[in-house]
Image: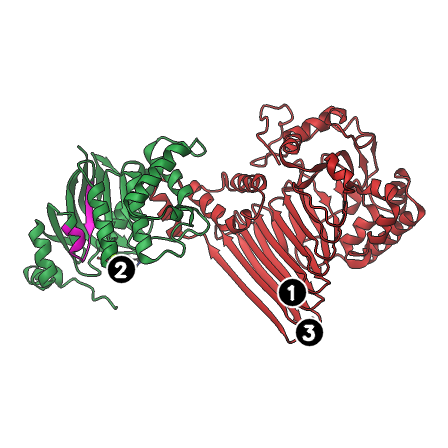
């Protein structure tokens, strides 16, 4: 069983410290929820895990099964089984979904694949793509479109889940995959995730909403405040936060709350 | 069209970097190598060797005078370093044009094999012209097309064999005094394609011309003339490569096109000269009533390219379209674009230009849209996008618009984007290396143009772009 371990992680963006010592352990097969007010650093954690060049790890480390991945390129992390479903998926004009996915899949399924070596066979790829798309209620036509170009919010998020389904990571981080979706779309995404996240996947769900967690009951709920995980509980903590917001968390952790930067909305 | 090259070949001793066509053949078996340098005697000798009529010799000598009178343009790229006296203007590599590859001299045939031409010919072409140095060494045309009256020959032969048709159109679309390099070509032209498609004849598969420079300090000056008669259609494709030498070569072609009423013609170029070639080409088409003329212009190679394919919309309802892709790598300057001149009412034009610059390369879009007085109801749409792969590289846009009529609709959009860190990160987070991700972004950037090409050329274009991208990220 694989373990993703984050220890004393400090991350700065353009020189400003954002994460100030995050500790987190996720085993394959577990579902964790990460909650916290806007600007508390949830996306920063997700980006730092995936290896975004603007997010500088100044202290601490991220390990998968004892291998420190903090210095690795994003693609090497992906090949070790890490996946981030983006809060804001990026548009890649002119690149067809199918071409992109086949390439990505070839690298992730065969982590030693070198540039220019052959891709997974077309037939195999097509079949899997067709199956996964129909499971997610996606029109096959979408695979011929350019990646995220002209996609609605819901289509983009579904595309992230499709990538998750095709790449079958050991650890998936979902950054507000449910935000901006209507309730039907949330349902599709939630069901999709629960189908995919079995014993083989450790999942970290960053969310403000309840729906995603209804279908994907977290064993652990973590609360982030001003760049630290200040509380960890079970599913009931998530429910409580949904109902009452973060004021009681702030009351319980006045020192950390004092460090919060007020976001200009 | 090229297929995999034999990389173990002995020819490949020079370090030619990522450029795969930089090898060269021996030149000791050539039939004739003209002296270096340019003067009236050199020009007269070319005419004499070709047994031309007096009018052509006079045309050449007059053109030389124009060339000498015209100053070197000081816009676009740097042309001041071209040494016209160090160039060979006429080199005859083999005795004549063959109809079977087996009759082409061994070295030359092998070169075309490496470039994949005979193979492409078998698979998907209606006809081929292979020009090597100054003249065409191989030519073919499908029999049924010949029977329908289609002419596809080298331009030298056309002058001999179809003198009336030739003289009616030659130098009419682009007269020698159009610009300095048109004058130079008019003085020393040799080879090139002559195409005539009779009324109503549709040529299904492309006609392909392949231009190859082999020797050092070579000047290639082919002259192409295409006449697409009423209601006829045709797609012509040209490719070009040259060996890599430390000194410069010059390629200066003139291409004249006439598309008559209701005709359709597409001219596709995949220009992949080595990085020591000056590529200064004048291309112009006249499109008559309800005809469609399209330039698809891919510029990947050369040291400096200055080329602005033009379409004069001469008849009501004519349409013109130019799709231009330029890739400027290290030491390259691509100054490319398009000209659209609306001479008749209700004509429409579209220019789509995409350029990519990397490793300090420079690309410029230079375009003109002109609407004559009385040309009412014209439409024109220009879109140019530039992609910069690194901060060392450069892109400029020079759009010129001249409108002398009120009732016109002109749209112009230009954008420059840097290859996005967010795009790279997104793709890399899915397991793609940085090089794969950049290459994918670039391929996607030109996809709207590449998808217009027939499949074989689309594959070729993507492959060439990938080669350009290789080793560029580090
Ligand atoms: N790329 C960035 N550039 C500048 N500031 C950033 C960037 N990413 C995050 N931040 C800052 O880091 C803090 C945490 O943001 P984020 O991780 O997006 O929070 P959350 O996802 O919890 O809403 C905020 O103050 C935000 O402004
Ligand atoms: Mg966020």
Tell me the element at label 1.
strand
- Front residue of B174/B218: it is B174
What colour scheme has been applied to the protein in the rendered image? by chain
Residue A180's label in the rendered image is: 2
Tell me the subunit letter for badge 3.
Answer: B
- Please state the horizontal and vertical placement of residue B419, each as a whole percent of the image: 45, 52
- Please state the horizontal and vertical placement of residue B146, each as a whole percent of the image: 77, 38
Query: Alpha carbon of mark 3 to alpha carbon of mark 1: how far?
Result: 11 Å
Mark 3 Cα within 10 Å, few/some/many (few <14, many 20+)? some
Q: Are marks 1 and 2 in contact (CB under 8 Å)?
A: no
Residue B367 visible? The answer is: yes
Magenta region, residue range: A202-214
Tell me the subunit letter for badge 1.
Answer: B
Residue at coordinates 30% horizontally, 52% vertically from top-left? Answer: A157
Q: Is residue B279 left or right of residue B383?
A: right
- The first of marks 3 and 1 along the sequence is 1
- Please state the horizontal and vertical placement of residue A153, each as a whole percent of the image: 32, 57
Q: Quadrant of the N terminus of chain B?
A: top right
Chain shaded red: B
Tell me the element at label 2.
loop
The mark tally for this picture is 3
Query: Alpha carbon of mark 1 to alpha carbon of mark 2: how far?
Result: 44 Å
Dot 1 and dot 2 within a common chain: no
Query: Which residue in the structure is indicated by mark 3?
Result: B404
Residue A208 within the segment the image draws in magenta: yes
Q: Foreground mark, 1 or 2?
A: 2
Query: Which residue in the structure is indicated by mark 1?
Result: B369
């Amino acid at each position: 069983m694989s373990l993703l371990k984050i220890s004393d992680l400090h991350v700065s963006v353009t020189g400003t410290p954002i994460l100030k010592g995050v500790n987190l352990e996720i085993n394959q097969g577990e579902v964790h929820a990460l909650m916290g007010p806007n600007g508390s650093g949830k996306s920063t954690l997700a980006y730092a895990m995936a290896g975004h060049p603007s997010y500088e790890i100044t202290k601490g480390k991220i390990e998968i099964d004892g291998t420190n991945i903090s210095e690795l390129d994003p693609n090497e992390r992906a090949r070790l089984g890490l996946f981030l479903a983006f809060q804001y998926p990026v548009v890649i004009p002119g690149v067809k979904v199918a071409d992109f996915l086949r390439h990505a899949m070839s690298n992730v399924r065969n982590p030693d694949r070198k540039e220019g070596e052959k891709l997974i066979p077309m037939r195999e790829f097509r079949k899997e793509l067709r199956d996964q798309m129909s499971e997610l209620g996606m029109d096959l036509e979408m695979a011929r479109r350019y990646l995220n170009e002209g996609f609605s919010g819901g289509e983009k998020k579904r595309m992230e889940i499709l990538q998750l389904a095709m790449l079958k990571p050991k650890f998936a981080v979902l950054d507000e995959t449910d935000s901006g979706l209507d309730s039907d779309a949330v349902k599709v995404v939630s069901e999709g995730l629960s189908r995919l996240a079995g014993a083989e996947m450790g999942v970290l769900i960053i969310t403000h909403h309840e729906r995603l967690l209804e279908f994907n009951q977290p064993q652990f709920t973590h609360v982030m405040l001003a760049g630290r995980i200040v509380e960890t509980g079970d599913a009931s903590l998530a429910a409580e936060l949904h109902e009452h917001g973060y004021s009681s968390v702030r009351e319980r952790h006045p020192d950390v709350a004092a460090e919060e930067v007020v976001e200009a909305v | 069209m090229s297929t995999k090259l034999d990389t173990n070949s002995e020819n490949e001793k020079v370090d030619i970097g990522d450029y795969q066509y930089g090898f060269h053949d021996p030149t000791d078996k050539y039939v004739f190598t003209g002296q270096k340098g340019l003067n009236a005697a050199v020009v007269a000798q070319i005419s004499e060797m070709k047994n031309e009529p007096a009018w052509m010799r006079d045309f050449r000598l007059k053109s030389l005078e124009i060339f000498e009178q015209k100053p070197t343009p000081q816009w676009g790229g740097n042309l001041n370093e071209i040494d016209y006296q160090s160039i060979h203007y006429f080199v005859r590599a083999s005795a004549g044009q063959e109809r079977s590859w087996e009759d082409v001299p061994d070295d030359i045939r092998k070169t075309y094999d490496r470039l994949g031409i005979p193979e492409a010919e078998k698979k998907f072409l209606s006809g081929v012209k292979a020009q090597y140095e100054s003249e065409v060494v191989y030519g073919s045309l499908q029999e049924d097309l010949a029977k329908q009256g289609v002419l596809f020959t080298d331009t030298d032969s056309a002058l001999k064999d179809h003198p009336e048709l030739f003289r009616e159109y030659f130098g009419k679309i682009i007269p020698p005094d159009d610009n300095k390099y048109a004058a130079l070509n008019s003085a020393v032209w040799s080879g090139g394609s002559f195409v005539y498609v009779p009324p109503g004849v549709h040529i299904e598969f492309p006609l392909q011309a392949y231009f190859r420079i082999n020797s050092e300090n070579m000047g290639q000056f082919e002259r192409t003339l295409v006449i697409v008669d009423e209601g006829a259609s045709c797609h012509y494709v040209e490719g070009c490569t040259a060996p890599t030498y430390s000194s410069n070569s010059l390629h200066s072609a003139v291409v004249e096109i006439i598309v008559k009423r209701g005709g359709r013609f597409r001219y596709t170029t995949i220009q992949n000269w080595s990085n020591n070639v000056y590529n200064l080409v004048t291309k112009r088409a006249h499109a008559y009533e309800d005809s469609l003329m399209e330039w698809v212009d891919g510029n990947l190679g050369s040291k400096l390219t200055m080329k602005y394919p033009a379409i004069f919309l001469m008849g009501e309802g004519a349409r013109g379209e130019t799709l231009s892709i330029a890739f400027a790598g290290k030491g390259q300057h691509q100054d490319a674009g398009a000209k659209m001149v609306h001479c008749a009412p209700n004509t429409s034009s579209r220019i789509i230009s995409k350029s990519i610059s990397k490793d300090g390369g420079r690309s410029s879009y230079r375009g003109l849209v002109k609407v004559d007085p009385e040309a009412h109801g014209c439409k024109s749409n220009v879109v140019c996008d530039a992609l910069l792969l690194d901060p060392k590289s450069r892109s400029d846009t020079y759009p010129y618009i001249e409108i002398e009529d009120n009732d016109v609709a002109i749209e112009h959009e230009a954008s420059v984007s840097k290859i996005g860190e967010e795009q790279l990160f997104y793709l890399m987070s899915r397991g793609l290396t940085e090089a794969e991700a950049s290459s994918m972004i670039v391929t996607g950037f030109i996809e709207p143009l590449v998808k217009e090409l027939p499949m074989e050329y689309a594959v070729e274009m993507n492959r060439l772009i990938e080669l350009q991208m290789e080793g560029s990220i580090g």
